[in-house]
Amino acid sequence: MMEAYLSGIGWVTGGGFGWGSQGGDCSFPELPLPALSRKDVFPEPNQRFGRMSDYAKLGLAALAFALRDAGLEGWSVKRSIGVVASTRLGCLATDLEYHRTVQLQGGGLASPNLFAYTLANCFLGDAAIQFGLTGSSVALNETGEDGLGSLRVALEEIALGEAETMLAGVCDLPVPEACAGLVALKPGAAFLVLSQAPLAGCSEYGKVALADGGSVLFNGSPCGDLEGLIKSALAGRRAG
Amino acid sequence: MIEVCISQAQAVTGLGPDLESLWQGVLAGRSAIRPLTRFATGRYLSGNASWIEGLEPVGGRSRINPLLAQLAEGFGPLPDGCSLITASTKGSVDAMERLQAGLECDPTEIPIAGLLHRIATRFGIDNPGININAACASSTIAVARGASLIAAGKADAVLVVCLDLVSEFVFSGFSALQALSPGVCRPFDRHRDGLTLGEGAAALLLMSRERAAREGRPELGIVAGWGAANDATHITAPARDACGLIQSVRQALVRAGIEPGQIAAVSAHGTATPYNDQMELTAFRALFGECNLPVHSVKGSIGHTLGAAGGIEIALGLRCLEAGIMPPTVGLQEPEEAGVGLVSASPQPIRGSYLLSTNSGFGGVNAALILRRGAL
């Protein structure tokens, strides 16, 4: 059994955005995602945010909220914190938008700014810069629909000694119209802060564990998907 | 910790359909970089790339399919219960291009999940596993993850498959970023002027040494150490002080239990962009001081193969260790000042057992892997 402490939860979904200690629920309803402004995410001016793709804004915001919830948003020295983000379609919406600029005038008007956001891991670089995260940062594509793939990898990384603290979660925009029906996914982003040991000055939600058969458990109870795990963690804190 | 070996390696590149043709090609100083005919390049900074013959989109399907078929040809048999990890940045990006252009295509090829299923099916693996996307360090991190799982006893056989295509999508983007060389890339050269794109694929079978020996499989090399770190500095440019790459290599050295002086050769990322190569040389001098160990970049021979780069370079690194030779860095004419004594346009002997392989990418990603000569 591999396990880690859960110390922070942040999300942006069709139901709104938030983080655990703020109260509220995290669910993934089939509603449009909120249009995030810089002020929704960062109290201070942030020159990059407005130029980011929607996919990058979505992921970065959920990461920011999770770090805020764990008391890790502020920093003065870079930290060896890793990030694993599961995504079904990654930056496909940005890819389509960028490619439309390629189709103009034989590629002569291709947008360099959009191209910089045509990698599924692009927002992890923004997060690393914004929050001083120097651990390994990767995006994962998987075939499963439970949203737990990144948690499995993060729990393994912690257990194998590759990292002490990891952010793990999901990030997906709605399926673009041109690709309707290709995959079933729940649009939105949610990230958890997982750590090998309790974080100083932070109260934990509980423990997340990976059983030998691949099941993910929260405080010993199996979780069917990421949304269910987050609901259990938030409910547990309210009850406690 | 359980020791991890690579018991089979294959690569498909512009130099040919297998690892041997890559090895012979780079050793002879050949380059597969040549004019592209796949799409019009008139509005781009370059008209050259390293591309693979025979990757035609039959029936409107992605060129990734014939690439995968070439890669899988003769590979295996795989051990029972083998896991799969893939590494690709853009997968079947040409399927998306065809969809946008209104051409015949199979839209189910667009999500990476579709590629995962096809790779698993092609290699006869039940579970499609995961694809790792960490820009140009994707496959190095994929191999590191496979090695980590085996070392901890969570798996005893992992197949890592890495692949990426030359597409107008990516070509136009690097051109827009002013990152393409107008001619042919010149890694670590004082007058380097940008990268040249390439396409390719690699397959690496990682196993516990114990299981490989028990099944009578060859031991091409040992995966002795690995590390990954983020610069946390810039989205598309590396940190000038090389902090992330240095941290990655130090992690790999600790994992391998060796000192920097035991590294006998380096397979560098060496993209031939001004910033990347300078950053790498800064890292190597910080790590190895004035020790002039051979440093090689394969990009002048096969271009920058993006998410496949690390896997191809690890496969090539195994051959380098076996032969005790680092190939010439094709395109190099006058070494960058910090690279004098490290990089060479001639083959260099490897005097030791450990080879370091490094890659870096967009998003500040860095990864390092240390290979040790195997028993064969």
Image: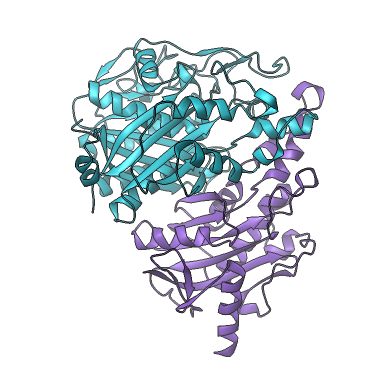
Considering only vertical position in the picture, is A178 above or below A55?
Answer: above
Asked if one can make out residue B88 in the rendered structure from this viewpoint, the answer is yes
Residue drawn at x 53%, y 53% is: A128
The quarter of the rendered structure image containing the C terminus of chain B is top left
In which quadrant will I find the N terminus of chain B?
Answer: bottom left
Q: Position of residue A229 (x, y in %)?
A: 56, 73
Task: Please indicate whether residue B265 sits to the left or right of residue B49 in the image.
Answer: left
Does A8 sit above or below residue A45?
Answer: below
Name the one closer to the observer, B39 or A107: B39
Q: According to the colouring, which chain is purple?
A: A
A159 in relation to B81, above or below: below
Query: Which chain: cyan?
Result: B
Task: Specify the quadrant of the image occupied by residue B159.
Answer: top left
Q: Nearer the viewer, residue B120 or A119?
A: B120
Q: How many discs appear?
A: 0
Q: Position of residue A211 (x, y in %)?
A: 41, 68
